[in-house]
Image (cartoon, grey):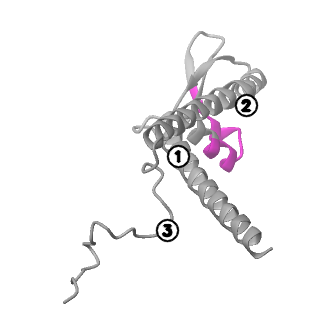
Amino acid sequence: MGKSVTPMMRNRDDDGPTATHFLSDPHGRRNTVMLIAAAILAAIAASCYAEFAIVVPACRGYGQAQGMLYAGTKTWNYRQEEGTVCMFRRADGSETAIPLQKFMPFLQSLTLDWTLDLRLSIPSFIALFTLSWLGLQRVLAGAGGSAVRSRDDG
């Protein structure tokens, strides 16, 4: 009699789907660490770029138009609903915080909030890099298989 295999349990010699898991090759763990490190670096680079190239000039411009001096930014705090806020000093020395949503379009401020908050952007970049890596592996595996088939046919 044959072995009964439930969907949750398979035989150890069952190869499963033809695509291999990216950790199963000899350099899988190293590749995974490199992928995660690249994603973290990309998230930090995107955050720095967004802050210094977009947020700071926008905050300075808004502050000058309102007669205030730009003092810095703060990223989203779970107790606040504003997201990223620009800190300003008034002429009398008092400080005020104004959210980006006050003087930027909603989608732009939402994207900047996501990019500047590394607690959100790092996992997102890891997921994006992983999906890109797996898609690239699938494309390369498909291209390699079709190239072998075309050589065999000709």
Q: Quadrant of the C terminus?
A: bottom right
Give residue 49's quadrant in the image: top right
Q: Quadrant of the N terminus?
A: bottom left
Q: Tell me the amino acid under the disc marked 3.
A: Thr
Q: CA distance from mark 3 to mark 2?
A: 45 Å
Q: Disc 2 and disc 1: Cα gap in Å? A: 21 Å
**Mark 1, residue position:** 124
* Left or right: 13, with 150 as reference point: left
Which one is earlier in the sequence, the residue at label 2 or at label 1?
Answer: 2
Q: Where does label 2 land, which residue?
A: 54
Q: Which residues are magenta?
A: 97-111
Residue 34: horizontal and vertical position, in percent?
52, 35
Residue 94: % across, % down: 56, 14
Mark found first going from the N terminus, 3 or 1? 3
Q: Counting residues from the N terminus, which is met first, the one under dot 3 or under dot 2? A: 3
Which residue is pictured at 74% across the width and 19% down the height? 67
Q: Is residue 83 visible?
A: no
- Tell me what residue is drawn at x 51 percent, y 43 percent: 126
Name the disc covering residue 18, or none: 3
